């Protein structure tokens, strides 16, 4: 997924983030500390686990693998702090048409929010 993006297409990336799907009580319980990568291009936001955590995240159905067209992103906002991470709440429409929310735990959250808002013009 990230492999098909050329380096000059990537506007932002963070490779040791954490994420939490707000889909259900089950997905809110999961911890993905340092297992997630977030890559933003002009056309797509990719949120996915690293190879070593992918099987467990899929097995537990944690809803943390998304390739989101920029037009499907509805809102992004700061949501507080957690240890050395800033929390970012992201609301989007999935490719299946579902309204979804995820929390992203990032080191470079302000840079991400600024770049994403610039791309989607919200």
Image (tube, rainbow, N blue to C red):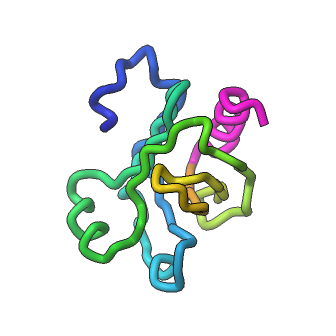
Q: Residue 21: percent from the left, percent from the top? A: 51, 68
| Drawn side of residue 59 relative to residue 74, left or right | left
Depth check: give the residue in front, 85 or 39.
Answer: 39
Residue 64 is inside the magenta segment: no
Which residue is painted at 74% across and 52% down in the image? Answer: 77
Say if residue 16 shows up in the picture.
no
Q: In which quarter of the image is the N terminus?
A: top left
Residue drawn at (47%, 50%) of the image: 95
Residue 57 vs 49, above or below: the answer is: below
Residue 85: x, y in percent? 59, 57
Q: Is residue 62 shown above or below 120? A: below
* Residue in front for this viewpoint, 47 or 96: 96
Residue 36 seen:
yes
Q: Majority secondary structure of the magenta segment?
A: helix
- Residue 102 shown left or right of residue 38 in the figure: right
Residue extending farthest right: 122
Query: Residue at left 53%, top 73%?
Result: 23
Whether 64 is drawn above or below 29: the answer is above
Q: In which quarter of the image is the C terminus?
A: top right
| Magenta-highlighted residues | 107-122
119 part of magenta stretch: yes
């Amino acid at each position: 997924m990230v492999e098909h993006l050329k380096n000059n297409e990537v506007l932002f990336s963070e490779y040791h983030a954490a994420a939490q799907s707000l889909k259900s009580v089950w997905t809110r319980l999961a911890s993905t500390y340092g297992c997630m990568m977030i890559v933003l291009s002009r056309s797509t936001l990719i949120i996915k686990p690293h190879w070593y955590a992918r099987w467990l995240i899929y097995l537990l159905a944690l809803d943390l693998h998304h390739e989101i067209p920029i037009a499907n992103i509805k809102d992004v906002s700061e949501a507080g702090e957690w240890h050395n991470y800033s929390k970012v709440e992201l609301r989007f429409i999935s490719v299946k048409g579902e309204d979804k929310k995820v929390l992203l735990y990032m080191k470079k959250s302000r840079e991400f929010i600024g770049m994403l808002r610039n791309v989607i013009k919200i």
